[in-house]
C-alpha cells in the first residue's frame, strides 16, 4: 500500500467517524455538539425532521466514503452539505469561530476527494500502460 492510499484510508476513517457521530447525534436527538457549533439548530428551529434527514445523509455518506466506487461523488455531496453548514453558521453575524468544525470536516472531505481522484488517475494510467504493453 503506497503512501497516498494510506493517507486516503486515514482520512476516510477520520471523516467517517466524525460524520457518523454527528449524524447519530442528530438522528437520536442527542446534544453532543453545542448549539453554537451545530448549524442544524439554526436551520430547524425545533423541527426534528430536517435534522434527522441531514443526520441520515451524514451516516449514509460516511458509509459511502468506504467504497471506492462512490467515494469521490459522496465526498463532493458532503462537501456541499458542509458549505451549507458553514454558510448558515456564519450567516450575517460573521461568527467565523462557530464555523470551525464544519470547515475542518470540509477540508478533510476535500482531501479525500483529492486523493481518491489522484489514485484513480494513477490506476487508469497503469491500466493504459498495461494495455499498450500487449
Image (spheres, rainbow, N blue to C red):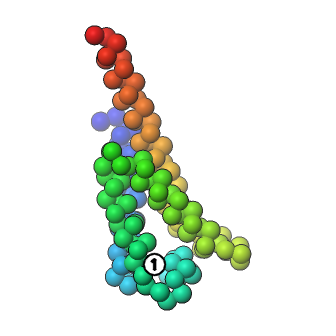
- The residue depicted at 39 percent of the width and 35 percent of the height is 120
Hey, which quadrant is residue 122 in on the image? top left
Farthest-out residue, bottom: 46
Residue in front for this viewpoint, 75 or 25: 75
Q: Quadrant of the N terminus?
A: top left
Mark 1 = which residue? 50
Residue 92: percent from left, percent from top: 71, 75
Q: Residues within 10 Å of mark 1 (few under 14, many from 20)?
A: some
Q: Image quadrant for the C terminus?
A: top left
- Asked whether, in this view, residue 125 is left or right of residue 80, the answer is left
30 is higher (above) or lower (below) than 90:
below
- Quarter where residue 119 is shown: top left
Please state the total of marks drawn on the protein image.
1
Above or below: residue 56 compared with residue 28: above
Is residue 109 visible in this depiction of the protein?
no
Please indicate, yes or no, whether residue 82 appears anywhere in the rendered image: yes
Quadrant position of residue 53:
bottom left
Residue positioned 52% across, 63% down in the render = 82
> Element at badge 1?
helix
Q: Residue farthest to the top?
A: 134
Position above or below: 82 against 33: above
Q: Nearer the viewer, residue 43 or 4?
A: 43
Q: Position of residue 60 (x, y in %)?
A: 34, 63
Q: Tell me what residue is drawn at x 34 percent, y 12 percent.
A: 132
Q: Residue at x 42, y 31 (%)?
A: 121
- Locate residue 4 relative to residue 87 in the image: left or right: left
The x and y percentages for residue 38 are: 51, 77
Amino acid at each position: 500500500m503506497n503512501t497516498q492510499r494510506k493517507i486516503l484510508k486515514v482520512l476516510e476513517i477520520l471523516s467517517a467517524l466524525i460524520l457518523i457521530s454527528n449524524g447519530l447525534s442528530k438522528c437520536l436527538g442527542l446534544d453532543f455538539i453545542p448549539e453554537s457549533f451545530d448549524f442544524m439548530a439554526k436551520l430547524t428551529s425545533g423541527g426534528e425532521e430536517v435534522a434527522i434527514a441531514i443526520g441520515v445523509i451524514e451516516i449514509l455518506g460516511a458509509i459511502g466514503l468506504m467504497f471506492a466506487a462512490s467515494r469521490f461523488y459522496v465526498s463532493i455531496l458532503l462537501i456541499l452539505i458542509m458549505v451549507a453548514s458553514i454558510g448558515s453558521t456564519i450567516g450575517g453575524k460573521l461568527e467565523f469561530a462557530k464555523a470551525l468544525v464544519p470547515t475542518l470536516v470540509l477540508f478533510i472531505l476535500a482531501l479525500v476527494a483529492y486523493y481518491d481522484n489522484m489514485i484513480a488517475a494513477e490506476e487508469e494510467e497503469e491500466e493504459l500502460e498495461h494495455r499498450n504493453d500487449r
